[in-house]
Amino acid sequence: MSFPQSASTQPPKTQYLQRPDGQLAYDDQGQGPLIVAVPGLGDLRQTYRLLTPQLVAADYRVVTLDPRGQGESSAQWPTYSPMSLGDDLSALIEHLGSGPAVVVSNSYSGGAAIWTAVQTPALVASIVLISPFVRDPKTSAMQRLMLSAMTHGPWKVGAWMAYLGTLFKGGKPNDDAAYRARLSANLREPGRYAALQAMLGETRAPIEARLGEVQAPSLVLLGRADPDFTDPAAEAHFIATALHGEEVLLEGTGHYPQAERPDETARTILQFLAKHPEV
């Protein structure tokens, strides 16, 4: 299934990187300093479809990656931890051969960006953490029970898609219906939802323990109305302080600034990168 591209009617050709336990799908657009962008849990690399053209227009090479288990990457892997995804990012940047890279992450992949920056600092010029989860959330027994009920049973894909819809607080893109149809179809492929469930059970404790080791310049970007965080401003401040980085809160925005506010998100990222010309 195809869906609209904001800058071109012709989507970029999918490329693959072979890893020991599977293959990773990515696309590659533009020329210039390298940006590698990875989506969050249960999403597709096309979540950046409105942001990528603006970064390419600013003379960056933008590679968007489907994480293991998601999109066009292999569905079945031994582990789906943010640490393993971080190792995948390191392997991809090395494979591309034009690093160091700016690593742009969203949600679950925020932990992976941290891990990549700590494990392979020579490959990472800077990191942009959009709505990042870098520590285990504090949840009640009731919340855990509700999550389990939502993510099991014949209704699980529909329930997940409904939940994702609640995370947009700044409006949805014009092509949202087509995008959601593609995402829903992907989650129904063999092994995809099992991968999502495995990610939900992974811990981020090793990520939180190493926040202070990140040396790369960092930007923490959250929507002030993000319902995935009890206090988005406090979470942004905690992460930015731990990383000695910058924090930006977008008004009236939820969990997906790259899709809800692509122009403002692009402007914020480019302003950040302009401060670090060594990138």
Image (cartoon, rainbow, N blue to C red):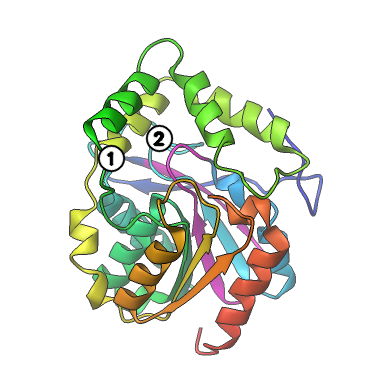
What kind of element bears circle 1? Answer: loop
Helix, strand or loop at label 2? It is loop
Q: CA distance from mark 1 to mark 2?
A: 9 Å
In the rendered image, residue 29 lying in the magenta stretch gets the answer yes
Compared with 24, 190 (above or below) is above
Asked whether residue 2 appears in the rendered view, the answer is no
Viewer-side residue, 186 vs 88:
186
Location of residue 155 in the rendering, given as x and y in whole percent from the top left corner: 46, 13
Q: Are marks 1 and 2 in contact (CB under 8 Å)?
A: yes
Q: Is residue 186 magenta?
A: no
Residue type (three-letter) at the residue carrying disc 2: Ser
From the viewer's perspective, tell me whether residue 259 is left or right of residue 117. Answer: right
Inspect this view and state whether residue 154 appears.
yes
Tell me if residue 15 comes above or below residue 214 in the rendering: above
Image point (42%, 20%), residue name: 190
Identity of the amino acid at label 1? Asp
Name the residue that disc number 2 marks: 74
Q: Residues within 10 Å of mark 1 (few under 14, many from 20)?
A: few
Identify which residue, 121 or 222, lies in the foreground.
222
Please rate how many residues cluster around mark 2, counting C-alpha atoms within 10 Å: few if below 14, some from 14 to 19, many from 20: many
Q: Residue at x 33, y 51 (%)?
A: 85
**Where is residue 90 drawn, in percent x and y?**
35, 63
* Residue position for label 1: 21
User: Picture coordinates of residue 259 (x, y %)?
Assistant: 65, 50
The picture quadrant where one finds residue 223 is bottom right
Q: Tell me the quarter of the picture where residue 127 sits.
A: bottom left
Residue 212 in percent (x, y) is at: 24, 76
Relative vertical location of residue 112 with respect to residue 70 in this rendering, above or below: below
Q: Which residues are magenta?
A: 23-43
Which one is earlier in the sequence, the residue at label 1 or at label 2?
1
Asked if 102 appears above or below 141 in the picture, the reply is below
Q: Residue at x 63, y 31 (%)?
A: 180
